[in-house]
Amino acid sequence: MAYVKHWADNEKINKTEKAKLEKDGLRILDDIPHYAKNGFGSIPKEQWDLFKWAGLYLQRPKEDGYFMMRVNVPSGILTKPQVETLAGIARDYGRGVFDITTRQAIQFHWLEIEQIPDIFNRLEAVGLSSAGACGDITRTIVGNPIAGLDPDELFDTTAIVKEVYDFFQKNEDFSNLPRKYKMSISANTKNASNAEINCVSFTPATKTIDGVTKSGFHLKVGGGLSSRPFLAETIDVFVEPERTLEIAIAVTTIFRDFGYREKRHLARLKFLIADWGPEKFKEKLLEYTGSLPSKGEEPKEEWNAGYFYGIHDQKQEGLKFLGFNVPVGRLDSEEVFEFARISGKYGNGEIRTCNSQNLIIPNIPAENVEALLKEPIFERISINPNSFLGHAVSCTGIEYCNLALVETKERMRLIAEELDQRISLDVPIRTHMVGCPNSCGQRQIADIGLQGMKMRNEKKEMVEAYEIYVGGTLNKGGKFNEKLKGKVAAEELTDVLEELLIYFRDQKAKGESFFDFVGRVGVSTLQGVLDTILGKETDGVSV
């Protein structure tokens, strides 16, 4: 290795760190052909966690030997051959399940170890990889899903994202980080990449240098969710586009060499930034990079939460991109093949994934739009979805995930569909459901976040339940939502949400967003409403 693992002499490092000193996570890629030849029983249990570096998790129950695989899709940009390859993997090995994640990646389920070498070969043949999609390593890079098409982007980040992604792919100098490490690079002025919740984000900025106004990036570090969420801090530097990789390497090196390795729950970059603060981090950064200009100006536009529904003009004259809703991010393989066919017939074959778990078909000549939208698949996959279903996000949940406590994906879909039947609002409500505190479904930034847990019912039986959080956003630097006290049994959740939303509808001003409403009436008022719905004391709050 090209660097010194100075933490190797620390006797207090956790057991995962000790295991990584003995064997780098990427070395599992060397072992997979042997395990594939000899079957799941040949894999020692102590090696199971290393499969994360190959983009593989054992789904529940682990002993059954089925894997979930996550495939990197930097900036969400896929060609027609790539889409067809992914659809084929889902069809041939994954029981047809094709999930879009909140980081623009693709997720498969039901894979067996014997199938993995062929899957790797198929991915490699079209320039895709699952390496580093999980584990203590740089994950797929979230970006602007309309990079290169976006009339409002400061500049096209496609080549920059590729350069940075390619550098970190299978790079053993950076495959032993203290914990997972999430990066975003985007020049979209509406923060489509959710910059504030990534470990490191390059965000659009301008600065006048020697009388010339240049477009580049600001640098945000230390964001992240899970049970202790942090919003990223902006470092006082301006990054010119050609220096993006250099700065990304420097930030990652700092995390690798100074990040915490004693307690895994405190090992994310966000904890180092919280302790150091932005000024100390900048000082350390400049030791690696030399002088950098101070920060410039940021575009002040409304956060779009990664939603691009409808028909939009591209910067290329005469071309459109179309944004479609994929309910809670789940397609079946035949639908994906159909998307590939349609994108090739009416456009250039590209498909883009969004961190809102949705899809974009770009590069459609204006004269082809009407015929495209008549294709039967767009009865379910709509450019103009119903409001609740169109703004519902969900993690994988207990169906496949070992960490989840409750069902999420199908439940979120059904709740959203039911709410669309019961109530109409003049503003969308972004509802995110997660099955555990790790928050892959990003519930902290939702208007309404639903976090699963277990509770005892009146019969003293353990049942699935949810806590409700209100008032999250990434507008104007961001604010995480706040918990309402009280657990809601799964079978009561739709009715409870309906009553909360009726209160919102009846008390809101015309056009007032849910976030603004929460800020105006206060969380305590909504707590009183929930207490009344659940038949509890309202602590004197007037409802």
Image: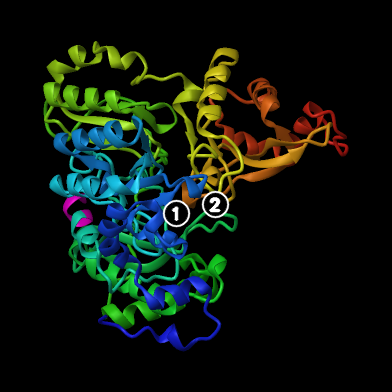
The answer to whether residue 199 shows anywhere in this view is no
Amino acid residing under circle 1 = Glu
Residue at 12% from the left image edge and 21% from the top image edge: 345
* Quadrant where the image shows the N terminus: bottom left
Q: Secondary structure at mark 1?
A: helix
Residue 243: x %, y % from top left? 21, 67
Residue 179 relative to residue 458: left or right: left
Circle 2: element type: loop
Where residue 30 appears, x then y in whole percent? Answer: 26, 64
Q: CA separation, marks 1 and 2?
A: 17 Å
In the rendered image, the vertical position of residue 386 relative to residue 24, given as above or below: above
| Magenta region | 154-161
Question: Where is residue 259 drawn, in percent x and y?
Answer: 46, 75
The residue to which callout 2 is attached is 438
Q: Is residue 393 above or below residue 166?
A: above
1 or 2: tag closer to the N-terminus: 1
Taking the image as drawn, is residue 217 in sight? Answer: yes
Of tags 1 and 2, which is closer to the observer?
2
